Image: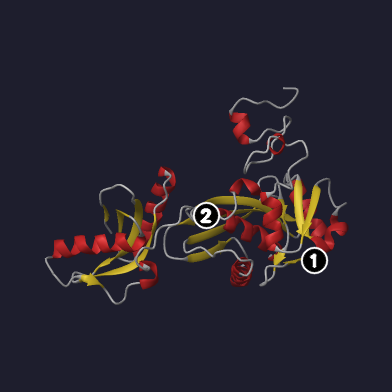
Amino acid sequence: MSTNTTTETTATREFIIVGQDQGTSYTLWDVAPAPTNDTKRAIALEEIGVEAMDALGEVTTVWATDARAAVDQLVADLREQSGLDDYTLSPASQMEAYGPAGDIAPPNEPYGNAETLAAAGTTAYRVAASSTPGLPLFNVFGLPAHHDAETRDRVRAGVVNSGLTWPQSNLAIRVDRTTGGPAERRSSSLDLAIACAAVAATSQLPASSLDGIALLAELGLDGKLRATPGLRDQVQAVAQAGAPAVLVPDVVLDEVRTAADVRVLGASTLSEVLSLLTGHAHHPQECVHCTDHRGPHRPCTYRQPCTDCREDGIEPVGV
């Protein structure tokens, strides 16, 4: 495995290219915009480098106007190094990644991290999503093995059928218990949290919108929310884990309102959920940033300031 870098020029951006030099041609495995954040870039290069090394490939970063131009530049450099005039892309290359000419990189990078709360049975779970450059993959870690594939199918279909874009990135979801209790055999109540974390990690929803709320619903292939058995227990579990608000399918809204001392919101589809989250419907009435009409933000009151305000020196009332 090797890592090479070309020079930055005006009106370009950095791309990460993964593939294998065959000596007489180059096999392209993937190409994607590199994160502009230095920390995310370093993490992405390290993770992709390990995967490429395991497959006897190499990682190269190239500055170019678009993905296709980046690959063309790399192949041109390798052609010059090899001394072969007919050095080109191998027929085994992933041409979908190569893309059409003028395939300008989107302004919003589909890379990032997000997390939220959910529950299955009497156990609360932290659901964390990470989207990094690499081969398009979708993995969910921490679920019972026999539910993993079903969950991924429901979430992917529900997101796409809600009019959202499924990311061409390496998307990993980690599900970890935050409270005591046995690992539940039925975990479909985590679907909505997994879907929203995935959408936020791929820059289609502000990650801050997931702060201050737990998401409890199975996701249908059509993007509709479905209630699961034991919803009152689930609400109690996330309340004990510290969630001040909970979102559930609206058909069971009245049934769970009294399950715990938390705000309960309802929705019928993933699209409605995203609208509520981006509109900060789950924030407390006294949220100072809702009052000052700020853009995407975390719940923030003078008694419980958000992380940003705490760092700026705002203290809870009475301290």
Q: How is the image coloured?
A: secondary structure
Judged left or right of residue 89, residue 29 is right
Work out whether mark 2 precedes mark 1 in sequence or the reverse, and give the earlier one: 2
**Which amino acid lies under the numbered mark 2 shown in the image of this protein?**
Ser
Numbered tag placed on residue 229 in the rendering: 1
Percent across and percent down for residue 261 are 83, 45
Residue at the spot 14% in from the left edge and 65% down from the top edge: 82
Residue at the spot 68% in from the left edge and 25% down from the top edge: 315
Q: Residues within 10 Å of mark 1 (few under 14, many from 20)?
A: few
* 245, above or below 171, in the image: above
Judged left or right of residue 82, residue 251 is right
Q: Can residue 190 be seen in this view?
A: no
Percent across and percent down for residue 286 are 77, 35
Viewer-proximal residue among 2 and 205: 205
Image quarter where the C terminus lies is top right
**Which amino acid lies under the numbered mark 1 shown in the image of this protein?**
Pro
Percent across and percent down for residue 87 are 18, 70
Viewer-proximal residue among 241 and 185: 241
Dot 2 corresponds to which residue?
Answer: 130
